[in-house]
């Protein structure tokens, strides 16, 4: 290896370390805010753990959502006793990352979505739709659509256990159609500024993957990422069934 090539490798390595250091500091700052200002340093084994998240390509926003998920469960247990260490959040961070990869279509071929039954899926979707409707923040028109879809899914749930063959596939196809309808109305319910913000956030999430994607693949992933952010913003479930 010549001196010029060796210098380039060293420069790239230094840039990578700086990127990882910056990633870890962002995680540390976010954890501090979640811990009500109590600073728990991301150093030693914790630094290595978070560095591995960066190396895997876990976007910061996705890592933050995993941390949020842990804190939601932690708060649900009652009064907190001590600040949370980042190590405790890893399982949730990895779970959210897997969910995100599947949602935007960049899962590894070896990844398999969690197996779930059709009746259980319908039950969760109806519950999520009911919760979204109860929030009262979606508007009367959207609420009417949610009521109609929830009623249809509730009726489907009653017979889902016994459907087989063509009837089961027809029900699954119907779920995909209802999901597309729900997303179309959801997109129309937010203003242009919000759509632009979600598109920008989708670009940020996918930044580490864009170079390895064909333009059409990136366009699909970008749209899927923006839709995921929209569902998150409006607390809407994925109606499409992708289980066993």
Image (cartoon, rainbow, N blue to C red):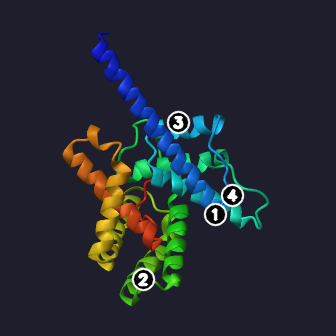
The residue carrying mark 1 is 72
The residue carrying mark 4 is 38
Q: Earlier in the sequence, mark 2 or mark 4?
A: 4
Q: Residue 138: which numbered mark, if any?
A: 2
- Which element type, helix, strand or loop, lies under badge 1? helix
Name the outermost residue toward the right: 81
Q: Is residue 99 left or right of residue 72?
A: left
CA–CA distance between discs 1 and 2?
A: 23 Å
In this view, 75 is above or below 102: below
CA–CA distance between discs 1 and 3?
A: 24 Å
The residue carrying mark 3 is 52
Q: Residue 44: which numbered mark, if any?
A: none
The residue shown at (62%, 61%) is: 34
- Is residue 95 shown to the viewer in this render? no
Q: Earlier in the sequence, mark 3 or mark 4?
A: 4
Q: Earlier in the sequence, mark 4 or mark 1?
A: 4
In this view, 194 is above or below 199: below
């Amino acid at each position: 290896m010549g001196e010029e090539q060796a210098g380039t490798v060293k420069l790239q390595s230094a840039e990578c370390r700086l990127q990882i250091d910056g990633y870890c500091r962002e995680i540390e700052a976010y954890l501090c805010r979640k811990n009500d200002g109590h600073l728990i340093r991301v150093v030693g084994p914790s630094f290595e753990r978070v560095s591995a998240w960066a190396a895997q390509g876990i976007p910061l926003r996705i890592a933050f959502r995993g941390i949020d998920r842990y804190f939601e469960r932690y708060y649900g247990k009652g009064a907190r006793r001590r600040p949370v260490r980042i190590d405790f959040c890893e399982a949730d961070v990895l779970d959210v990352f897997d969910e995100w990869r599947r949602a935007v279509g960049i899962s590894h071929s070896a990844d398999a979505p969690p197996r779930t039954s059709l009746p259980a899926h319908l039950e969760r979707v109806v519950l999520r739709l009911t919760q979204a409707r109860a929030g009262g923040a979606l508007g009367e028109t959207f609420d009417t659509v949610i009521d109609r879809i929830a009623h249809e899914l509730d009726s489907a749930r009653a017979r889902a256990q016994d459907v087989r063959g063509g009837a089961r596939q027809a029900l699954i196809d119907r779920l995909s159609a209802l999901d597309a309808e729900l997303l179309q109305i959801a997109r129309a319910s937010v203003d242009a500024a919000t759509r632009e913000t979600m598109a920008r956030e989708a670009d940020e999430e996918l930044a580490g993957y864009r170079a390895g994607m064909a333009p059409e693949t990136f366009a699909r992933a970008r749209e899927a990422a923006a839709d995921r952010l929209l569902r998150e913003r409006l607390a809407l479930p994925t109606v499409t069934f992708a289980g066993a």
